[in-house]
Amino acid sequence: MRSTFGGRLPGLTPMHLRRGHLLVLEGPDGSGRTTEATLLKEWLEVRGHPVVDTGLRRSTLVSRIIDRAKEGHTFGRTTMALLYAADFADQLENKILPSLASGATVLADRYVYTLIARAVVRGASRPWADRLYSFALVPDLTIYLDARPDILLHRAIAKFGFLDYWESGMDLSLSPDRFESFLTYQKSLREQFEQMARQYGFCRVDANRTPEAVHRDVRRIVQEWFTRQLRRPTRPERIDDAAIGSTSRGR
């Protein structure tokens, strides 16, 4: 039974939790996450699964505000966490929950795990970050694309020709050298993901390999997960308000 991480959005009812599937692809920039989201969506749709994709900074409410704040390199750490929480809450209410209620598979290209990791690396306590994003639904399946920081660095340079200010953690004054700051920041993020992978039972995929190899593993994990759902006994499931807001691991 799907639940939240402990909090609750106003208006959330058991009907929102009955249907659909919430699948999450997590991992840092350069792990191949967005490419994999595109490939996985196509693969699922060919097999008859209606898919709604979502991700960070896609809300019509605050996404442009976040973009403008990042351009000026004046984004405060607490402000960043709060704006991203508002962005996610807007998408959850207006996109994710209605899609799940309709029976669709929601495929998230990053989730609150990334937001928690970023907040903690920037000085927030883990309990504070957990509470801030506690209204999020626990995903049915989370796949974590794990790539080494040095691999991420080479991919970023090859793709863009430069290192992003925020993805390098330059706002944290880790090092005046952007390359060194990038490696230090990505290492810290990876440590946070490692902790959450153990806590929430992520399915880890080695993302240091080619996109083809990664996609084969992701497809296998998703196929096995759907197969297990089909084998479950078909019986009415009782969902009451007491279940909403309880913390549990993803299925």
Image (tube, grey):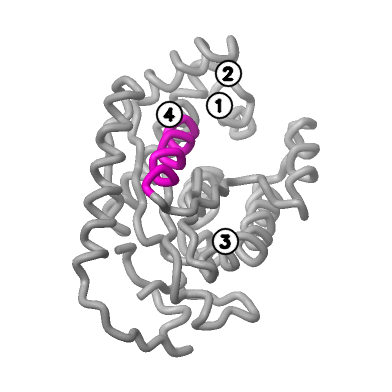
CA distance separating discs 3 and 4: 23 Å
The circle on residue 163 is 2
CA distance separating discs 4 and 1: 17 Å
Q: Which residue is mark 4?
A: 32
User: Counting residues from the N terminus, which is met first, the one under dot 4 or under dot 2?
Assistant: 4
- Looking at the image, residue 159 lies above or below residue 93: above
**In front: 174, or 78?**
78
Answer few, some or many: residues within 10 Å of disc 4's Cα (few below 14, many 20 plus, some between 14 and 19).
many
Mark 3 falls on what kind of element?
Answer: helix
Q: Which residue is mark 1?
A: 168
Question: In x, y percent, where is residue 63?
Answer: 73, 46
Q: Kindly identify the amino acid type of the residue bearing the numbered disc 2.
A: Leu
Q: Kindly identify the amino acid type of the residue bearing the numbered disc 1.
A: Ser
* Quadrant in which the N terminus appears: bottom left
Residue at the image point whose x is 28% and y is 56% from the top:
226
Q: Kindly identify the amino acid type of the residue bearing the numbered disc 4.
A: Gly
Q: Which residue is mark 3?
A: 96
Q: Is residue 198 left or right of residue 27?
A: left
Residue at the image point whose x is 44% and y is 13% from the top:
154
